[in-house]
Image (spheres, rainbow, N blue to C red):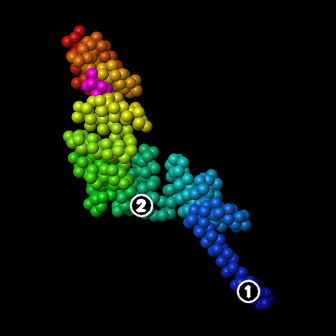
Amino acid sequence: MLKKYYTILFLLIVFVPSLLKAQDTSRYKVYFWLDNQLYDQAAGYLEKILKDTADAGLANDLARSYYFMKDYNRAAKLLENTLKKNPYDITANRFMANIYELQNAYVNAIPYLRRLADTLANNALLYRELGNIYLAQDDIDSGKVYLEKAYNNGKKIPAVVASYADYLIKTEQYDACEDILYAYFAVDSMNTEIIDKMIKVADTRSRYDTITKLSGKYFGKIGSLVNTNALIIKAYIYSNKTDSAIVLANSLLDKRILNEKVFYFLGIAYGEKLNFDSSRYFIQRAIEFGLSPNVESYWLQIAKYAEHTSKFELAKSYRDTAYYLFHNPVSLFWNGMMYARTKAADKARAKYFFNEFLQKQNPEKPSPPNLLQHALLWLKENN
């Protein structure tokens, strides 16, 4: 009996370290391949190994290999098997969330992220990720919960502060937003992510001087966003610094940074300089270039500049398009005004458009009172 015991002990002493060493060697190979992006080799090796073992760690490694090979279906199948055995497996939950986020199925990522949040307590970036998803889905209450948690655990992380600022802007808590942004700005005055939000909240409050003061730290810098650069151009226009606005806008165009808002505000800037042909050209570029050309102000502004250059039929066609797209009778009013003016001088057409303007009013959303009064007065005087 004692001899049998010693025989078993001997076998354990001799063979178990060898088995463990073999397993360590296997993992070393896998990690080497993964670290060097040799995902095909890692996957092929792991597929063979996993035929004879049910090691959860190696299964996750194979899922990672499939993930980086963009074979998301096979990766997800392995990860879900892991989660059936251990719902709080950190690797499996993280990669499942990643898979859904890559497919823009953010709502489907939420359960995995919430399990991670339960497991990795006080993780500011994880709270931020969840909060951003909820905010994008207009679930303001859930977004608030997680973005507040993120901020309370990550006040020194610019991405966290910026996301919390987005929530505060969306809920029109502008004072609170400026408080957290300027608190961070006092420590790091060059972070483009924070300055981006400072510019956006200043724009919502029409604080254009604030934006022009910040512009030197942001405009055209690495990490700056084109739409925010466009807000800087807008701020220079509204601060009566039109020449600077034109220089800034053209500096972006010279770098082939093309954007509908940059075109639009450059058009407005040229309009302020009474260069109506250039203004019309750039707003037309905004309409043609934009991903969403159905912006009413584009059509009304380009009509205004066409009218200033006595291209009345062209101006009318722009306003007709605006009315067709937006059903806003204000377009009809401005056509009436154009034909009522001396240069266009067509009372019959003015009368037609003013009458159309009054008849097309939406009782739930009437046009501004001054426009209604002007149309009524003109029709009375020219009846």
Residue visible at 29% across and 49% down? Answer: 199
Task: Give the vertical position of 261 relative to 176 (above or below).
Answer: above
Q: Is residue 379 left or right of residue 4?
A: left
Q: Is residue 182 left or right of residue 293?
A: left
Mark 1, residue position? 10
Q: The residue under label 1 is which amino acid type?
A: Phe
Residue 304 highlighted magenta (yes or no): yes
Q: Which is nearer the eye, 276 or 9?
A: 276
Q: Which residues are magenta?
A: 303-310
Residue 56 seen in the current view: no
**Mark 1 or 2 closer to N-term?**
1
Q: Position of residue 363 (x, y in %)?
A: 33, 23
Residue visible at 50% across and 56% down? Answer: 113
Residue visible at 39% across and 54% down? Answer: 147
How many C-alpha atoms fall within 10 Å of the one at disc 1: few (<14), some, or many (≥20)? few
Task: Give the vertical position of 92 relative to 327 (above or below).
Answer: below
Q: Give the label on residue 124, or none.
A: 2
Q: Which is nearer the eye, 233 or 83?
A: 233
